[in-house]
Amino acid sequence: MKRELLIKEIIDELSILKNKLDFLSVGNLHDINIISEYHIQEILNIILNLNLISSNSVTKNAVSIDLEDRDNKIAVQVTATNNKVKVQETLDKFFLNNLNEKFEILLVFILGKKQKTYNNLRINEGFYFNAKEHILDFTDIVLKFPTLPTAKIEKIRNVLKNDKLPGIKKENPVNRFKKNFAIKNEICNKLYKRNLSVKDREILYYIPYRSFVYDSLIIRSIDDVSYPNIDDDENHPISTWYRAQIHDISEYGIETMVPSSFDLVMNESGKWNFLNQRDKNKLPLRINYLRATILQRIPFDNIIKLDMNPDPVYGYPTLYVEYKNDKKPFSEEIPFLIGYYHDENDCRKVHYFELSEKDENL
């Protein structure tokens, strides 16, 4: 009876944790991922008899992996993003940084629900990675329970009941809201053009990037020490400073565009996927080819300060940002179609290819 009650408590706690992640991700609030990373570390240690620790405690700004056990040669990436692109990105960085020479096993833990399949992943020769075996989620934890002794199940329950990360004080949500609200007001007051006519505002519905007094910003990490030189540190997944074009300001943050593009396919219902290795001229009927621009969403939660003094290199304001999400300034990177307006009969509003609409089978 005790065993059944413990398992029920664990399932309840995992459900609560998953719902928190889902709702906070919608609001671009990602600090809970840090706490969840600690949960996964402790749970995997219990289930698999490991000694995982945070990779950042071993190597500052560790790339590609979040947890590691060097004695057992196991590395773990913990992420709330469940798509194939994220898994492939993790593998690419793992091999690029020669981590396969230190670790024999790479696990990818999805904070939520993993996809049914992850086909055609590119894996370096000689390294064994099986998506069914090495990509895990909360369900995989629950499936381990029948073979675990009651003492271990009780330890897992205790880890999940304690939602405080040792040594880190959780930010008061009211203070966070006040900080983000103040940042948003400051940015809007400084960047938006003033005295726009009604007609101007109608046009800006289609082309929001023309709403601003500057077309670009310098995005700069608060930890950057390379400016104005190029940041060539291989441990940084993205440069600690770069120039990006402003696209729009939303309720949750700033949208920026970068000078790159994705080749996509989309069906009639709006589902989409990357073109990958397919020939765009030989697509099935009702599947359209599109070339989309890359959009990055920088949440107010990551923004520290907007300095309107033009930087000496490009002459643009500088947005100081805390690199939080996988050591990047943005919480999400998606394809989108830029809107345009020529006249009332020749216009298109912005179209976002949200990750929730991505279909790996398309």
Image (cartoon, rainbow, N blue to C red):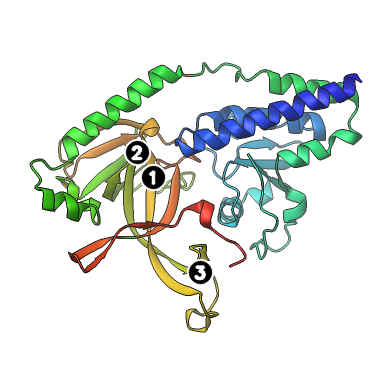
130 lies left or right of 230 = right
Q: Residue at x 60, y 37 (%)?
A: 66
Report which residue position mark 3 lands on. 267
Residue 15 in percent (x, y) is at: 68, 32
Question: Tag count in the figure?
Answer: 3
Q: Is residue 105 above or below residue 22?
A: below
Q: CA distance from mark 1 to mark 2?
A: 7 Å
Task: Determine contact: label 1, label 2, CB under 8 Å.
Answer: yes
Front residue of 132/100: it is: 132
Name the amino acid type tagged 1. Answer: Arg
What numbered label is drawn on residue 145? none
Dot 2 or dot 3: first in sequence order is 2
Q: Nearer the viewer, mark 3 or mark 1?
A: 3
What is the crowding at mark 1: few (fewer than 14 residues within 10 Å), some, or many (at least 20)? many
Q: CA distance from mark 3 to mark 1?
A: 25 Å
Q: Residue at x 23, y 56 (%)?
A: 207
Q: Is residue 119 above or below residue 331?
A: below
Task: Determine contact: label 3, label 1, CB under 8 Å.
Answer: no
Q: Is residue 339 above or below residue 172?
A: below
Confirm whether residue 256 shows in the render.
yes
Name the amino acid type tagged 3. Answer: Asn
What numbered label is drawn on residue 297? 1
Q: Secondary structure at mark 1?
A: strand
